[in-house]
Each structure stands twice: as structure tokens, then as C-alpha cells.
């Protein structure tokens, strides 16, 4: 008698695994985890937006104060915002072959400081929604909180702390960018879980959202860390004096 | 390089007043998100699709491809909402794995489906705005909505610089590829790092040059641009309002805002 290769349950499991892989394989582009337009209920949209306001006001006052002293820095702020947009829209080399994108906010926080990045990040996210359809208008508040506030502040905190502890500069840049990216991903998963936990607790939903996005986001954080190190090293090696003159790289 | 921006400048609705388009997109978006109802979402999706494709003249295939852009996010999130891991099976499906089940309930699936349709409808509202209204005109509307002057000026400059930097980045990318700069994983990582660094240096120089040219044209702390004002027509605004009122009334009739 010929034995069946798989039992029914095994076959079904195989089928589900195949579906899961197909879904992951269908991911056309891996970017930062922007919450899609219309994905959050109205109450959450407003709440996250309100939560961003103090940070945005701080960023606004920071930029306005800087401009009152040096009016010529207006174009530099604008270019910094455009730089964050462009660096996050470029395809980066990745292991899996699908095209992925950096978030660029960790780099922004290291170069321009977290206060400026909060307001610039809001503008960049608005343009990403309008020009690239990443994120959206109603979810702008939530995305601003996770990408332009939580991530950059953590990245800057890590960078600052590493500076105090005299950690190797390459390592501290790597840690800042990668941890900032991971923190953004956790905050986004938490935002999704709070809004949508159909038949579990918010905690269970948080774990599921973390798990589902982990295969794309974990490698991305590592790659983002490495690329940020390469960019910062590149800047130091051939443009340090010019950039100091214009006000970048003042942190250390 | 940014296909949405290019399509938007070719749109047939471009000459219409920005306020009309902005209010149509944003008001409908808010109603659609507040109602969270599959029927309303389908109506919005249909209305926005017709307006963008038939009136706006965006090719249907490109429009559909744009709508599929957020597909990965939609699929993964729906997966996270529907599938449960717990010791007892639910009513829709269940796969046993040891003592636990990968399982899902009908209610969760229905929830995920409604959510996905709503999100797609919301994306179609966003596309209506971004495929018919160029960014400078949206900035005009923001200016009229009393957005701080510093913010709109920054946005205008950033919008301009995005294209300058994208062009620079693509030129650098081409020359890197000519020199086998992405031969393997290691070299392409290094190339990208150099690209980022060079891009920032060039950007800083551009910023200096732009400021010098602004000073040469008597910049006094305020950027003045000439808005092309096309006043909105009362009929169009009334139609927008009526459409949204109908959607809201329909939702209330169906059993309240969910």
C-alpha cells in the first residue's frame, strides 16, 4: 500500500505557509512603515495629530529662532528637508531583491537635530503622501509621531548617549540609525494595534502587527544603520570643513 | 521621476479652481473615514475613480496600478487582524499546530475587509487631489487657510529642491553604474553611502547659491509668489457639499456612524 506523503492537516499547513510566503513575496516595495491613508479611525487620527502639536511647535520655534539670527539658513533648512525626502525615495541595495527605501529620519536627526526634523519631517511626510502615495492626509498625525518625532528623538538620544560614553563613532551612528528605525516600527505597530484589535487584546494585536512586519522591517533597520554609517563617514572624509562652515556636523 | 506629479500637470482638471478640488477631496476623505461603512466607501471609490479617470483624463491602467501601490501594507495588516494564535479554534478556519491553532473568525475577516475597502476609498480621495492639483496650488489653499508663512515658504522651497536633488541623485547613480558601482552587494552599499554624502554636500552648495540669488533680488525675509487665483464656483462647492451630505445621511439611515 502506498503511503500518502502528507496528512490532511499537514497539507493544509503547507498551503497556508505558501499563501503567507506569496503575500510576503507580493510586497512590491519595502519602505518605512507608513500607515496607509484611511487606515485609522477618525478619533485616533485627531488624537495622534494633537500629540504631535507640542513637538511641531518646538520645531517651528527652533527654526524661526535660528532664522531670526541667520536668515541665510532658510535655504539650508529647505535643502535638508528635500534631502530627507530624496534619500527616502531612492532605491537601496537589499538582499532580497525587492526594492526597499530608507527612512532617512535617523540620519536627519544626527545631522540637523531632532527639533528641526520634527517640522521638516511633517512637510516631508505630506509630500510623500501627495507625490508618492506613501502614508496619507488623515494618517499624517500618526505617521508624523512615529517617523518624525519618536524615531528621530530616540536616534538623537542614542547618538548623544554614545557620545557621552565615548563609544566608537561608527558604532554610535549605526546604533542611532538602526534603533531609531526599530523604534519607529514598534510605535507604528502599537498605533495600528490600539486602533484595530478585532477579537484580541491590544497587547495580542501589538504582537501580531510586530510579527507580520518583522520580516521586512528588521533587515531594513540593519541596512539603514549600515548606510547611515557610510554616509556619515563619507561626509567626514571629504567634506568636513565645508559642512562645518554651513552648520552641519556641529554635534561633535 | 515622480509619476504622480507628472500626471497631475497633464490632468484635464488642472485649470479648475484649487479650492473646489481641495474641498472635494478633503471633505469626502473625512466623511469616508468617519463613516467606516463599506457601501459609502464603494460609492466614494467609484466617484473618485470616475472623476480622476474620466474627467481628469488619467489613463485607467496607470490609475489602477497606482491604487495597487499600498497593496503590501493592506495585505499584511489584514493578515495581522484576521489570523489569531490561540488554544481554541474560531469559526472561519483553523490550522492545528501542536496544542495551538492558527485560526480566524468571520467577524474579524469582515472587519478587515471593511477596513481595507475604506482605506482604498480614502486613497482614491488622496489620488484625486494629487492627480489633479499641482503642489504649488495646494500651497495656495494652505496659505488661504492661514498656515504659518514660514511653513508654506519652507514647503515651496522643499518642493522645488526635491526635483533638483532627484536629478542630481539620478546623475550620480548613472555614473556609478557606468563604473560598475553596483557590481555586488558590498560595492553597491558603498556607492549608496557615497551618493548620500555627495548629495548632501551638493545640496548645501545649492542652498548657498539660491540664497545668494535671493539676496540679489532683494530678499527681505519673505518669499512672494504670484498666485494664479481662480475663484471657486458656487455650483461646484454646492455639489461637493450635497454629495457628502448624501453620504452622511445614508450612513445615519443605515444605523449610525460606526
Image (cartoon, coloured by chain):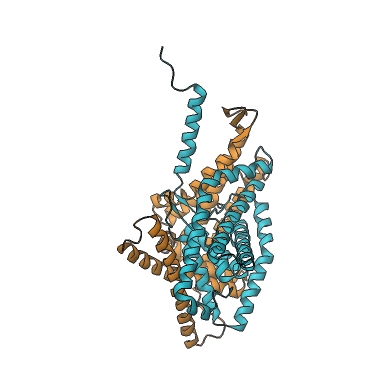
Chain colours: A cyan, B orange
- Residue in view at x 39 percent, y 69 percent: B168
Which of the 4 quarters of the picture holds residue A60? bottom right
Question: Where residue B107 sits: x, y (%)?
Answer: 62, 34
Establish if A211 lies above or below B23.
above
Q: Does A169 sit above or below residue B29?
A: below
Task: Please tell me which residue lies in front, B3 or B206.
Answer: B206
Q: Residue B144 falls in which quadrant of the image?
A: bottom right
Who's the residue at 50% across and 27% down the image? A12
What residue is at 55 percent from the left and 54 percent from the top?
A: A34
* Residue placed most toward the observer, B197 or A190: B197
Between B36 and A226, the one lying in front of the other is: A226
Say above or below: B253 vs B104: below
Can I make out residue A105 in this image?
no
Query: Residue B181: x percent and y percent?
Result: 35, 62
Q: Is residue B115 above or below residue B209?
A: above
> Where in the figure is residue B137, as x and y percent of width and height?
50, 68
**Extreme residue toward the top, this view:** A1
Judge from the rendering whether residue B103 lies leftward or rightward of residue B192; answer left or right: right
Q: Nearer the viewer, residue B59 or B171?
A: B171
Q: Please provide percent x and percent y for residue A183.
A: 61, 55
Number of on-image labels: 0
Q: Which quarter shows the N terminus of chain A?
A: top left
Q: Is residue A241 visible?
A: yes
Check the picture and name the quadrant holding the C terminus of chain A.
Answer: bottom right
**Residue at (64, 55) in percent of width and height:** A45
Amino acid at each position: 500500500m502506498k503511503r500518502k506523503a502528507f496528512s490532511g492537516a499537514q497539507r493544509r499547513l503547507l498551503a497556508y505557509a505558501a499563501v503567507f510566503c506569496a503575500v510576503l513575496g507580493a510586497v512590491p516595495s519595502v519602505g518605512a512603515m507608513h500607515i496607509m491613508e484611511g487606515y485609522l479611525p477618525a478619533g485616533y487620527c485627531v488624537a495622534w495629530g494633537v500629540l504631535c502639536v507640542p513637538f511641531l511647535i518646538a520645531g517651528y520655534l527652533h527654526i524661526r529662532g535660528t532664522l531670526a539670527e541667520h536668515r541665510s539658513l532658510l535655504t539650508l533648512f529647505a535643502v535638508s528637508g528635500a534631502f530627507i525626502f530624496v534619500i527616502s525615495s531612492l532605491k537601496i541595495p537589499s538582499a532580497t531583491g525587492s526594492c526597499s527605501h530608507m527612512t532617512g529620519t535617523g540620519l536627519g536627526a544626527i545631522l540637523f537635530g531632532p527639533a528641526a526634523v520634527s517640522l521638516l519631517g511633517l512637510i516631508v511626510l505630506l509630500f510623500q503622501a501627495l507625490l508618492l502615495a506613501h502614508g496619507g492626509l488623515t494618517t499624517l498625525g500618526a505617521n508624523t509621531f512615529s517617523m518624525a518625532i519618536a524615531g528621530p528623538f530616540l536616534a538623537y538620544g542614542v547618538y548623544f548617549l554614545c557620545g557621552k560614553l565615548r563609544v566608537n563613532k561608527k558604532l554610535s551612528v549605526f546604533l542611532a540609525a538602526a534603533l531609531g528605525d526599530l523604534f519607529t516600527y514598534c510605535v507604528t505597530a502599537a498605533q495600528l494595534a490600539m486602533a484595530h484589535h478585532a477579537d484580541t487584546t491590544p497587547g495580542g494585536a501589538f504582537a501580531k502587527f510586530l510579527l507580520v512586519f518583522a520580516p521586512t522591517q528588521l533587515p531594513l533597520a540593519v541596512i539603514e544603520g549600515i548606510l547611515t554609517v557610510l554616509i556619515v563617514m563619507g561626509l567626514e572624509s571629504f567634506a568636513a570643513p565645508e559642512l562645518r562652515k554651513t552648520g552641519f556636523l556641529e554635534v561633535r | 521621476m515622480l509619476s504622480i506629479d507628472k500626471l497631475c500637470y497633464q490632468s484635464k482638471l488642472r485649470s479648475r479652481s484649487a479650492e473646489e478640488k481641495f474641498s472635494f477631496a478633503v471633505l469626502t476623505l473625512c466623511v469616508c473615514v468617519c463613516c467606516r461603512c463599506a457601501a459609502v466607501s464603494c460609492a466614494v471609490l467609484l466617484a473618485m475613480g470616475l472623476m480622476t479617470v474620466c474627467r481628469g483624463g488619467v489613463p485607467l491602467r496607470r490609475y489602477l496600478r497606482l491604487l495597487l501601490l499600498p497593496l503590501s501594507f493592506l495585505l499584511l495588516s489584514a493578515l495581522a487582524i484576521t489570523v489569531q494564535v490561540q488554544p481554541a479554534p474560531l469559526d472561519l478556519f483553523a490550522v492545528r499546530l501542536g496544542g495551538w491553532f492558527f485560526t480566524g473568525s468571520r467577524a474579524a475577516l469582515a472587519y478587515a475587509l471593511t477596513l481595507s475597502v475604506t482605506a482604498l476609498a480614502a486613497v482614491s480621495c488622496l489620488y484625486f487631489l494629487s492627480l489633479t492639483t499641482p503642489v504649488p496650488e495646494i500651497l495656495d489653499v494652505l496659505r488661504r487657510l492661514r498656515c504659518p508663512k514660514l511653513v508654506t515658504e519652507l514647503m515651496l522651497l522643499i518642493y522645488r529642491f526635491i526635483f533638483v536633488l532627484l536629478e542630481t541623485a539620478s546623475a550620480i547613480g548613472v555614473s556609478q553604474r557606468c563604473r560598475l558601482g553596483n557590481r555586488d552587494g558590498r560595492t553597491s552599499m558603498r556607492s549608496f553611502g557615497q551618493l548620500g554624502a555627495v548629495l548632501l554636500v551638493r545640496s548645501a552648495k545649492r542652498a548657498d547659491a539660491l540664497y545668494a540669488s535671493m539676496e540679489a533680488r532683494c530678499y527681505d525675509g519673505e518669499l512672494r509668489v504670484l498666485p494664479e487665483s481662480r475663484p471657486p464656483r458656487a455650483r461646484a462647492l454646492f455639489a461637493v457639499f450635497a454629495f457628502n451630505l448624501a453620504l452622511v445621511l445614508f450612513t445615519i439611515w443605515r444605523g449610525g456612524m460606526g
